[in-house]
Image: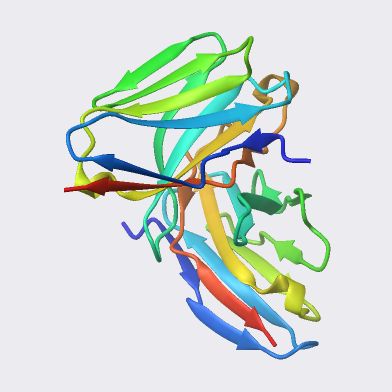
Amino acid sequence: NAGVTQTPKFRVLKTGQSMTLLCAQDMNHEYMYWYRQDPGMGLRLIHYSVGEGTTAKGEVPDGYNVSRLKKQNFLLGLESAAPSQTSVYFCASSYSMVTDTQYFGPGTRLTVL
Amino acid sequence: DQQVKQNSPSLSVQEGRISILNCDYTNSMFDYFLWYKKYPAEGPTFLISISSIKDKNEDGRFTVFLNKSAKHLSLHIVPSQPGDSAVYFCAASPVSSGTYKYIFGTGTRLKVLA
């Protein structure tokens, strides 16, 4: 049981490049989330999904897109990376209610030059 | 506008003593609160939660207190252990409004000295 895994762990991009971060969970969770963490700030929700085929915007969605084609996977895309998107990205999942515990992945450290 | 505030960026406590981490919030609609612990290079892990219908919740060495009138919650760790050294985040959500979102504080780095 791997829990929540994230790919890749580290990435360096140039401004304007695109990339996709992959989150996978093997706990059959309905809800999945993407957060970013920046120095001096808490975790901020980018996008979330309450089930396969559904996505919704969080606090800071601009510049990101997401897809949840399979229940176990939640993809975060950056179409044209900007230095302001340099951050640590965390994926999380929870069972079926907002009060259920969110399980976090280990994070992806992204640097945009 | 920071709706969830952890005003102490860091805290040092001697092993065996009590650690008290504080969290303030501004949104009176928040009715469910969480504490997460985060070690370096790892994702946050859930620690303890409390609903606004309670003013206290205990789980082993960890107790969370909620003061709704003051919009304040605190996490007590007794006794503190070196393995408790981590960054602690509080988070809040207005779950009764049907939201799926949590607002996180900026975190407090706890260092437990052996």
Picture layout, residue B64 above or below residue A3: above
Q: Nearer the viewer, residue B55 or A90?
A: B55
Residue A53 placement, left or right of A100: right
Residue A99 visible at all: no
Q: Nearer the viewer, residue B80 or B29?
A: B80
Residue at 67% x, 49% y: name it.
A49
Residue B73's x, y, as percent? 52, 23
Q: Nearer the viewer, residue B35 or B72?
A: B72
Picture layout, residue A81 above or below residue A60: below
Residue B114 placement, left or right of A87: left
Residue A76 visible at all: yes
* Location of residue A89 by image quarter: bottom right
Picture layout, residue A59 above or below residue B29: below
Residue A66's x, y, as percent? 72, 63
Residue at 37% x, 56% y: name it.
B39
Picture layout, residue B103 above or below residue A38: above
